Image (tube, rainbow, N blue to C red):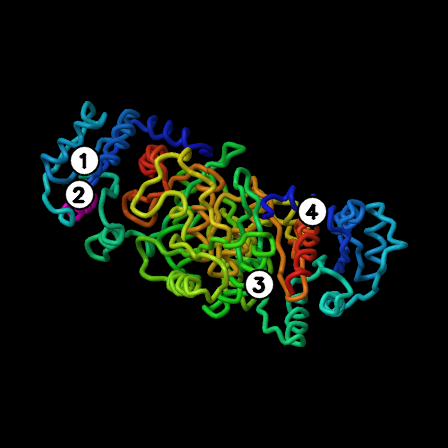
């Protein structure tokens, strides 16, 4: 089981083959990060943008002395289209968002006909490194889907389970979060969580244990859960936290970053090849680990 | 202005004892917290609950309750009604949830507020003490309203602003938290935030300021910028009150104290005094801290209502 971001980077290094990371409209910061990642020798950057300008930017970063390729394209929309085409045609392995509008990027990546969606639904998974022990936890969906239905939550969970398998989490333990640990017909999140939990009991997710509904104190603390009458192998040792909606997922991830000072990376799941979003609350210092995570997929 | 839980403990000793109705202290952690709070001089408890269970847990934590006022009742709703009625008639200064479903207490408060004709909406305010932050930060509503609409949000905010005024914050800064981000279209939580901001600016919410930022990222980094490293995070930028969009958001965020180095205190501000709402999973120290907070609020509310 991969327990730290350092291990993610080391595993990506050990895999040997360099992954081709295509970046439409890369910023100077993108290039600086790509340079740092290239030093670990697990990627080869392919930069699509205005040729001369890209060359100039590259020269101001450590990437200048490392392997990279520049593909000339004058328009940012066409650069993105080209990058997605390259992924579809197996000319690149990872798509990384450059300096462009987030909605345009997502819409293009998830376009039914010309995009990269391979699962029934794409979702975003935040990966956090615990502060007190070597363990990674996954929280989803923290960025993409607003108010997922039960069916969509099932797909979001399956996407997270795919990532958990890549991180070698044996029999993942999932907390389907809600505001209370009891099933309350007036609180929809508790109903969805209880159904997912029942589905897991019937082994519909394979070797996975989903417990829900769990409030956060039960999820985080076994003793607290026992005092509320919840006795589960999941409590106090959760691998995946499934949030009810974006009004929980988005602030939860950010609170852990900004108040908890927990290191976070993230990845879009449900696409044919890994896609790295340019989220402003993933710190620059963690972006190398984020690229390494994509390289493992 | 009360900035830390140390301030609260000190003031609770000064201003106590206050009379506290404890609703079903039928669990060791709760009874222990009541015992220690009495020893500290915070409270004079009135224990309401099942006679046998209360006596058993009192014995377990070596708390001699022979001279403590007790009301024996087994029905959960009747316990909540009794304690809440005592608060509203002034027989006690505050009440606290023990091993009893919170919804029973809300029902009792709604009934009493209705009788008193206040029209007050129930909401739970959860205060956090965060190291290096020179003020309290609160989430609201963390316990009562599942999906508050605009009108309910106004009422929820007014309750929180009232509490902060009592704690000495003359113009609390507020953020209306939202999942609104670069993608996904407009969210109702964000729209409500803009409307609340206008209401606050025109003075309809009392002395307060609703800031533009609606996410932690915007508090600490700002739109159009990128978090470089964690060294740049200045915790002092946190506003005092975070209005959340749903019960799920409020309850999940506010209990992250089980994970992070923060301390939590939750209460309902009724028109007559505080009702403490510790989680049924809370431990003695946390419950004691909540009682201390209640003492301070109960003391200060007397001069206001």
Residue bearing the label numbered 2: A86
Residue A242 at what x, y percent from top left?
47, 52
Which secondary structure is most common in the magenta stretch? helix
From the viewer's perspective, is residue B146 above or below residue A142?
Answer: below
Q: Say if labels 1 and 4 share a chain.
A: no
A291 left or right, relative to B81: left
Q: Of all residues shown, which one is farthest toward the top?
A: A65
Residue A81 on the magenta segment? yes
Proximity of marks 2 and 1: CB atoms separated by less than 8 Å: yes
Is residue B36 visible in the rendered image? The answer is yes
Q: Give the label, 1 or 4, closer to the camera.
A: 4
Q: How far, Cα to Cα, is label 3 from label 2?
A: 53 Å
Which label was assigned to residue B123?
Answer: 3
From the viewer's perspective, is residue A266 above or below residue A132?
Answer: below
User: Which of the 4 image quadrants contains residue A69?
Assistant: top left
Q: Which residue is drawn at 37% across and 56% down?
A: B180
Residue bearing the label numbered 4: B11
């Amino acid at each position: 089981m991969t327990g730290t971001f350092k291990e993610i980077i080391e595993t990506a290094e050990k895999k040997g083959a360099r992954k081709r990371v295509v970046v439409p409209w890369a910023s100077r910061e993108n290039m600086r990060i790509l340079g740092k990642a290239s030093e670990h020798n697990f990627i080869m950057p392919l930069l699509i943008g205005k040729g001369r300008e890209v060359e100039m930017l590259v020269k101001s970063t450590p990437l200048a002395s490392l392997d990279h390729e520049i593909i000339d394209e004058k328009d940012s929309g066409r650069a993105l289209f080209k990058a997605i085409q390259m992924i579809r045609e197996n000319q690149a392995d990872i798509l990384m968002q450059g300096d462009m509008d987030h909605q345009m990027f997502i819409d293009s990546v998830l376009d039914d006909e010309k995009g990269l969606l391979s699962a029934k639904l794409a979702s975003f998974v935040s990966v956090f490194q615990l502060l007190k022990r070597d363990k990674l936890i996954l929280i989803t969906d923290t960025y993409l889907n607003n108010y997922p239905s039960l069916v969509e939550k099932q797909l979001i969970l399956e996407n997270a389970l795919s990532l958990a398998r890549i991180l070698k989490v044996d029999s993942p333990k999932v907390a389907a979060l809600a505001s209370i640990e009891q099933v309350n017909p007036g609180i929809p999140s508790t109903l969805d969580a209880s159904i997912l939990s029942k589905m897991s009991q019937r082994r519909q997710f394979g070797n996975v244990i989903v417990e829900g509904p769990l409030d956060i104190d039960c999820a985080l603390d076994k003793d607290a859960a026992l005092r509320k009458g919840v006795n589960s192998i999941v409590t106090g040792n959760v691998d995946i936290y499934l949030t009810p909606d974006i009004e929980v997922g988005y602030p939860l991830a950010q609170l852990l970053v900004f108040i908890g000072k927990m290191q976070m990376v993230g990845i879009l799941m449900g696409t044919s090849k890994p896609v790295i979003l340019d989220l402003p609350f993933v710190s620059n210092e963690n972006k190398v680990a984020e690229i390494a995570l994509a390289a493992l997929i | 202005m009360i900035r830390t839980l140390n301030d609260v403990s000190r003031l609770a000793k000064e201003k106590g004892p206050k009379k506290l109705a404890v609703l079903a202290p039928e669990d060791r952690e709760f009874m222990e917290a009541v015992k220690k709070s009495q020893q500290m001089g915070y409270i004079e408890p009135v224990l309401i609950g099942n006679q046998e269970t209360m006596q058993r847990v009192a014995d377990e934590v070596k708390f001699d309750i022979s001279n403590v006022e007790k009301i024996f009742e087994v029905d959960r709703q009747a316990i909540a009604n009794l304690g809440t009625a005592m608060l509203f008639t002034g027989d006690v200064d505050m009440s606290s949830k023990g091993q009893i479903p919170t919804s029973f207490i809300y029902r009792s408060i709604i009934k009493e507020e209705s009788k008193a004709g206040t029209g007050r909406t129930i909401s739970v305010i959860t205060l956090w003490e965060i190291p290096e932050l020179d003020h309290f930060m609160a989430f609201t509503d963390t316990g009562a309203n599942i999906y508050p609409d605009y009108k309910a949000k106004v009422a929820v905010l007014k309750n929180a602003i009232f509490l902060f005024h009592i704690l000495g914050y003359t113009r609390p800064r507020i953020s209306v938290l939202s999942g609104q981000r670069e993608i996904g279209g407009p969210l109702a939580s964000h729209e409500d935030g803009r409307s609340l901001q206008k209401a606050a600016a025109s003075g309809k919410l009392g002395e307060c300021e609703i800031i533009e930022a609606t996410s932690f990222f915007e508090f600490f980094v700002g739109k159009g910028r990128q978090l470089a490293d964690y060294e740049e995070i200045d915790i002092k930028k946190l506003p005092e009150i975070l209005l959340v969009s749903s019960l799920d958001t409020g309850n999940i965020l506010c209990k992250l104290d089980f994970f992070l180095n923060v301390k939590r205190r939750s209460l309902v501000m009724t028109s007559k005094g505080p009702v403490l709402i510790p989680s049924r999973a809370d431990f003695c120290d946390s419950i004691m801290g909540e009682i201390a907070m209640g003492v301070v609020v109960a003391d200060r509310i007397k001069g206001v209502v």
